[in-house]
Amino acid sequence: MTLPVTPSFRLDGRRAVVTGAGRGIGLACAEALAEAGAHVTLVARSLGEVEAATSDIAAAGGRAEAARLDVSDLAAVAAFFAQRPGFDVLINNAGTNRPKPMTQVSEADYDAVIDLNLKAAFFVAQAAAQRMIDEGIAGSLIHMGSQMGHVGGINRSLYCASKWALEGLSKAIALDLAPHRIRSNTIPPTFIETPLTRPFFEDAAFTASVLAKIKLGRVGQVEDIMGAVLFLASDASALMTGSSLVVDGGWTAD
């Protein structure tokens, strides 16, 4: 009997790029990919952050480089991808949030959240995918969504709008790119403790409200995202596209 062989989770010889990679979820994604053997390019608006992260990954035995890129600058995005060989994996992670009641949302708030979470994400994916197509790379696009792209949330009108849109965008991208063997999926996490979210958890009432909905009873950590990223980046998920790998501790199951 010939037994089936488990597809590899290794990424040796592959190139990956992670946006918003200086800290938090982005940094964890970059480290997961580097641990699996990928050469990872970490990009962010602040070069200092990604340079420090790159040094830490290299010290741990990974291969990484840092690059400054403001993903909201579409000309810079186009130039970034045009000037480099095609990547095998994109982690479309850069994002923002301005939580407030919908009656208090300004046009500036709207533009800041939608432009980064949706517009920039689209054009980053477009530029990455075009290079994959040009070079015949069967790549993987992984968009960092949110459980708020599957449910509603108090004071999250803009964030929900952007993340729901990202889910639909990823499905449509998956259909467009399937003939090129390029996959597109999302990872929607629950609340993950990061430098960005940590101040929210100083509010005991907020923390209690979050834990009441996370059925596994704890706030997520960046390590909880790393396995999902590795799965979607690797051959282990070779037949998975247009889907959403929800990492929410049961929030959306209720």
Image: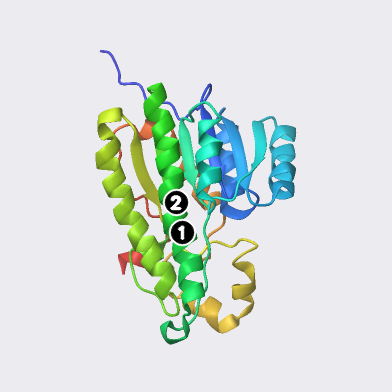
x and y, in percent, of residue 96 in the image = 53, 63
Above or below — where is 39 with respect to 43? Answer: above
Three-letter amino acid code of the residue under disc 2? Ala
Farthest residue toward the top? 1
Above or below — where is 24 with respect to 232? Answer: below
The quadrant in which residue 239 appears is top left
What residue sits right under mark 1 in the picture?
Answer: 117
Q: Nearer the viewer, residue 18 or 8?
A: 18
Three-letter amino acid code of the residue under disc 1? Asn
Q: Are marks 2 and 1 in contact (CB under 8 Å)?
A: yes
In the image, 46: left or right of 130? right
The quadrant in which residue 135 appears is top left
Does residue 187 appear anywhere in the picture? yes
What residue sits right under mark 2 in the picture?
Answer: 121
**Residue shown at 34%/33% (left/top)?**
182
Q: Nearer the viewer, residue 167 or 117?
A: 117
x and y, in percent, of residue 74 in the image = 50, 48
x and y, in percent, of residue 120 in the image = 47, 53
**Residue shown at 29%/41% (left/top)?**
174
**Residue shown at 35%/21% (left/top)?**
5
Q: How is the image coloured?
A: rainbow
The quadrant in which residue 152 appears is bottom left
Classify mark 2: residues with Cα within 10 Å, few (<14), some (14-19) or many (20+). many
SS class, disc 2 = helix
Q: Which quadrant of the figure contains the C terminus?
A: bottom left
SS class, disc 1 = helix
